[in-house]
Amino acid sequence: MMLAASPTRRGALEIADAVKIYDPQGARIPALDHCSLSIPAGEICMIVGPSGCGKTTLLNAIAGFHGLEGGAIYLDGEMLCGPERAVAPIDCSRVVVFQNGALFPWKTNLENVAFGPIVQKRLSRAEAHDKARRLMVDAGLGGYENKYPGELSSGLQRRVEIVRALMNDPAVLLLDEPYRALDALSKSVMHEALLQTYYRTGVTIFFITHDLEEAVFLGHQVVVMTSRPCRPKKIFEIDIPHPRDYGVLTSRRFRELAAAVSACVNEEAVKALALGEKEG
Amino acid sequence: MASDVIVTHASLGQRKGFLAKWFTRPEFNSSTRRGIISFVVALVLWELGSKSGAWFGVDVPVIGAVPAPDTVIAAWIKLIGDPGYWQSWLQSVIRVAIGFSAATIVAVPFGLALSSNPNVRSFAFPVFELLRPIPPLAWVPASIIFWPTQELSIDFVIFLGGFYTIVLNVLGGADSIDPRLIQAARSMGASPWNIFRRIVLPAVLPSIGVGMEVGIGITWEVVVAAEMISGGGGASSSGGGLGFLIWNSYIGGAYPNIIVGMISIGIAGYLSSALVRLCVHRLTPWLKRS
């Protein structure tokens, strides 16, 4: 309902038959195996799967950190990488929020958030700082502007990082287990904050997680990946209407979906364990 | 418990004389007091060892052969009134400042170039590693031959003292930059120049700081070797640097002055390290310090 507010919906991701092979000393380890996935613009897609299955490989390919051996990735119909272009360009249409955070420790939180528009020369320093200050207040980060990231809890750091990503008006936010290190209580606060941000911006979110409840609570769809090589095993459409809040967690539908996803992931986790894959 | 201790100290201060009062003043915390005690104990041991020469029939090594603290202090008091001594201070400080600044100015870009460009690294690093173990003392003759003036030869030897350490620290710091920081900057549209200026440089700054802190100490360590080159007028009259003061006092047999020179270098090194540390802290305000 609030998504209708954003005029043009951007951020439709199409992953078509993606193949990625790691080749250390000719070992040819397949990481992505004909992986196809389609994420509608302005939706939250949650990726779950056993450790080391290749979820981050997919994210890196979307972000442009490495290329593919086969297949293609499209953003809003335009090819990011594929037969004609091995590696997607790294630009601010897709911004990554990393697992352990990648805030610049020597910049204050405000300078971190204002970084993108300043280096792109899209905004003057003063304008960027104004916008950053507004976004930080919107995200409940007022008062932390002049502190360094190291002075904040990891939950707040992650929140600053998401605001920093949003400063660049990305079409897609790529989140790689951003809340992994948080305790359950901080996590639930972060989830609601993320949803608030999402309802405000309507940005497409590609979100890797190990937390199945997190996946069902946040996602429009939950994609369960197979153990390596990685491809979607099953896609769950989460038909709980947005906007959601923590009341959802106790609903019957939520419990049913969480149980189904859990059973599906468990099958793969057992397989992965049997293969003895290293955590990754 | 803590208040008991304070009361005891306070009453001690009332009964005892000036020294006890001074020692128990509230500005001193327990670690300061321990420092004072260790300093006093060291002086007493030195005095005893030096005066008696042997304890329980065994010769006291090192301490037994050096002048006693009272002789050293007497010699020091004499030197303090001598303008040549202060000129030596000034000369050494200027030489260390020049050599160390030059080392920093050359080492930081060199370390960054080694780290950022594999070609530079494979060309320059082997030579660097070959030269690094050569002690600055060994460079003295070559340095006298290479450089046109005596002053430049001295500055060069001091430069070598700081250079290698700073390069290695910059290299280590630049090699260990978290690649995600660079990926994050790229994905936010930072150009290569922006990445260098806004990511690499500040990320390496703490390592530059560590290199400088260690390096300034080493430059004082090599000051004696460097100032052997100096033909200054010696401890009295014109001065020739603190390192020269030591060497010249040895040649001239003024043994207490050797110790004065050594302690002077210790003090100079302590003060300049503190200064460098202060500057580094100012430049890296984001690092947490206890």
Image (spheres, rainbow, N blue to C red):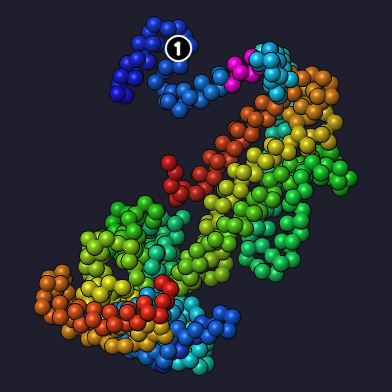
Image quadrant occupied by the N terminus of chain B: top left
Q: Of B243 and B8, which appears nearest the observer? A: B8
Q: Of B210 and B56, which appears nearest the observer? A: B56
The region drawn magenta spans: B42-50
Q: Characterize the local packing of mark 1: few (<14), some (14-19) or many (20 or more) Cα atoms within 10 angstroms.
A: some
Q: Farthest residue toward the front?
A: B57
Residue occupying image coordinates x 28% and y 79%? A266
Report x, y in % for residue B190: 50, 70
Image quadrant occupied by the C terminus of chain B: top left
Residue occupying image coordinates x 45% and y 50%? B286
Q: Is residue A105 something that shows in the picture?
A: yes
Report x, y in % for residue B6: 34, 19
Residue occupying image coordinates x 37% and y 79%? A274
- Residue at numbered disc 1: B20
The question of residue A273 being in magenta is answered with: no
Amino acid, disc 1: Ala
Q: Main secondary structure of the magenta part?
A: helix
Q: Chain of mark 1?
A: B
